[in-house]
Image (cartoon, rainbow, N blue to C red):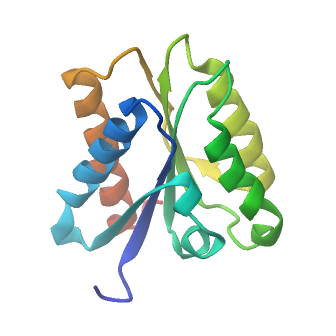
Amino acid sequence: MSADKKILLIVYASQTGRTARLAQAVADGARAQQEIGVQVHCCQAPDATLDTLLAAHALVLATPENFGYMAGLLKDFLDRTYTPAQGRCQGLPYAIVVSAGNDGRGAMAAIERIAIGYGWRSISPALRVVGEPDAAALAQASELGAALASGLACGVF
């Protein structure tokens, strides 16, 4: 792929597969816009590194809601990258996807607080899916991916 392509990084944690399906739908929606020149990198949180974060032009964080909080694996990614990323990814556009058993608000709020510390900027309301992701939820996730890819390609983000 061309070095000048914008990179959309999707980092997710999933134990039951629900969040993985949502993250994949975001990636599929972004990849469907392939003619606009955005590279999509979708990876599980343990595989995400400082280098993948710093290479990204936009970020999606996808997590289940565990005990009213984000998944520990996603928190681990944020912990591992926070200090070395300081001042290096200011203004990074990001979006949140939460697969919730309850209401997901605790996970969303925790990620939003951490994003402030990174200096990232939210570019979309969080996509919150309560229960099993149905066709409508997967379509919303795909639309989010398509919108992010289009925004990156057009320089909106």
Looking at the image, which residue is at 37% across and 34% down?
Answer: 17
Near-viewer residue (71 or 103): 71
Number of numbered discs visible in the structure rendering: 0
Looking at the image, which residue is at 40% across and 14% down?
Answer: 131
Task: Farthest residue to the bottom: give it.
Answer: 3
Near-viewer residue (8 or 99): 99
Say whether residue 149 is left or right of residue 7.
Answer: left
Looking at the image, which residue is at 37% across and 30% down?
Answer: 18
Looking at the image, which residue is at 62% across and 45% down?
Answer: 74
Please, is residue 114 above or below residue 108 in the view?
below
Near-viewer residue (23 or 128): 23
In percent of width and height, residue 140 lies at 29, 31
Quadrant occupied by the N terminus: bottom left
Say whether residue 114 is left or right of residue 134.
Answer: right
Task: Farthest residue to the top: give it.
Answer: 102
In percent of width and height, residue 157 lies at 48, 60
The answer to which quarter of the image holds residue 136 is: top left
The answer to which quarter of the image holds residue 8 is: bottom left
Please, is residue 129 above or below residue 98 in the view?
above
Say whether residue 74 is left or right of residue 26.
Answer: right
Please, is residue 149 above or below residue 125 in the view?
below
In percent of width and height, residue 126 lies at 51, 32
